[in-house]
Every structure is written in C-alpha cells, then in structure tokens.
Amino acid sequence: MALQFRTPGIGAGDLPAPTIPGAADRRTETDTLLARVENAMHDLSGTTAPSAAQRAALHHLRAGGGRFRARLAIDAGLSLGIAPARIAAVAAAVELVHNASLIHDDLQDRDDRRRGRASIWVEFGDAVAVSAGDLMLSAAYGALAAGGSAAASLVDLLHQRIREMIRGQDSDLTRPDQYLDLAEYETIAAGKSGPLLILPLEMSLVLAGRDDQRAIAAACGRHFAIGYQMFDDLRDVAIDRAGGALNAVLVLTRSGHSSPGARVTDLAIGHFHQADTLSRSLPADCGRLLARSARKLSRQLTGDTRT
C-alpha cells in the first residue's frame, strides 16, 4: 500500500500569514505585491481561450490558500531591498510549483477534497489534473523570466528543488510504512515540503547577491518542514492510523517507544527552535516571517497562548 504523506497547506489555520511589526507602508507593499503575484499566476496559467487544463488550473487558484510561500518571498525580498518585479517573479514561481504539487498529490493519493471543495481530479478527471499540474509547473519557469540577470540561476535552482520534492514524493509512494524509522520519516518530510519552504529565502538571497547564506536558508526550511509535519501528525493520529498515512507518532509507536506523542512533541519543538534560530541569523532579517511562524507553532505545542 502506498503511503499517504499529506502536506497540508501552510498559511491558513495554524499559520495565518503572520503580521510582521512595522510601518503601514510595509504592509501596503506586501498587499500590493500579493495582488501582483495573484495576477501573474492567473496570467501565466492562461486566461484567453483556455483549454481544459487552463480552466482546471484557474479553478484551483481561485480556491485561495494562505500563499505562505509567496509571503516568505515577499517579506524576504523587501527586507533585502530587491526590486518589486523580481520579488513578484520569485513569489509567483514558488506558489505555482506548490499548487501544482497539490494537484498532483491529490491525484496520486486519491484525496478527494482540497480547500473545502472537490479536488481537481474529481472535478475535471485524472488526465486534466495531470495536465493542469504540468501547466502550473511550466508557468513557474515562465514567471522567472522576470528575474533579470539572475534568471538563469533562479531557473537552475528551481529545477534542483523540484527534483528534491519529486524524490520525496517517490519515497512517500514506494517505501513500506512498517520499515520506516524516525530518520527515514524526517527525510521524507523534509523532501516533500522542505524544498518549497527553502526556495523563497534561497532565491531572494541569490537576487541580493548573498549566495553565501543559501546553506542556512536550506537548513531553516528543512527544520520548519519537519516540525510542521510533526505538528500536524500530533493532531491526526487516529485519522492517519485508519488511512494508512505516514505519521511520526505511529512510527515511534511501532518502534516500541513508551511515550510516542510526548516524544514527537519534543522533537517538533526542537525543529521549530532550530528554524527560528537559523532564520534570525539570515542577513537583513529576511527570515523573520519563517522565524515568527516557527515560534507561534512551538508555543501552541507548549500551551503558550501568546501571539
């Protein structure tokens, strides 16, 4: 049986696009760029004489979502002083890949609901869902055409991270659950969702000429991805047990751990702490949105209700 490793949408619910303290003009810039990103994603997916795949892609985008990865790119780009057009290019590219992965994941896992409505494969059929996801992947590369002199580097980086994400998906679908240990679980968690949490920071650093900080950005995204998946697993033990989904608590239970829930809680807090610490070490405080999100989730696990 193929594992069903769910990657919930970050930004809604538990991660409600945190508000960063600062001037009103910063919030206005963010809102303006988010609107620009939304328009770019729709335009790149195709709005004139749309095919079935285009209609499906636009239907998916109109369902909303937290746009957390776009917000990471926007906040990092503004902190680093990157031109708005290039910030929007990175934000749109990462969000397009993320949404393409959701369409394909739902199809592979046969998940029939996404964002409160029927999944694309349910609404439009399997073949159109494949094409819609492919279209959005292509659109992501198209978005990076606005990356200026760094466009080639950004395209190469996007390919590398998509390749890692696909490797994580392969591990999800092919590795029998009963043979997993915690290290393998973390590798799958990091591989499936880590690359698209790393990219917004990584690409922003490339545009700012700070390639020397990319390794730190990669570590930030990896720790956050693992911590968030564990956070989600703690809430969904019964559902995941019934559905055969990969879950950290169940992995430790099968290994004979006496207090698997408590251990996963401690591990998640540790990963969030690492993500917070590393994010705050990035130049110009460009990782502060990821850091704040990590602290927020960690406090939820410890029962601290501060915002």
Image (cartoon, rainbow, N blue to C red):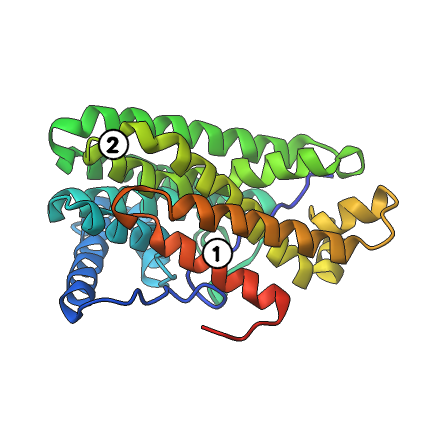
- Give percent across and percent down for residue 84: 12, 49
Residue drawn 68% across the image and 41% down it: 3
Q: Dot 1 corresponds to which residue?
A: 294
- The quadrant holding residue 292 is bottom left
Which part of the image, by quadrant, shows the N terminus?
top right
Q: Residue at x 32, y 67 (%)?
A: 19
* Of 31 and 259, the residue lying toward us: 259
Instruction: Tell me which corner region of the image, top left, top right, bottom left or bottom right, holds residue 163.
Output: top left
| The image quarter in which residue 59 lies | bottom left
Quick one: label 2 or label 1, which is nearer the N terminus?
2
- The quadrant of the picture occupied by the C terminus is bottom left
Q: On the picture, is 63 further left or further right than 140?
A: right
Residue at 28%, 67% in the rendered image: 21
Whether residue 10 is visible: no
Where residue 38 sits: x, y (%)? Answer: 23, 56
Cβ–Cβ under 8 Å for marks 2 and 1: no
Helix, strand or loop under label 2: loop
The residue located at (48%, 50%) in the rendering is 121
Q: Residues within 10 Å of mark 1 (few under 14, many from 20)?
A: many
Vertically, is 35 above or below 106?
below
Indicate the amino acid at tag 2: Arg
Q: Amino acid at mark 1?
A: Ala
Separation of residues labelled 2 and 1 (CA atoms): 23 Å
Which is more toward the observer, 85 or 72? 72
- As drawn, the label of residue 210 is 2
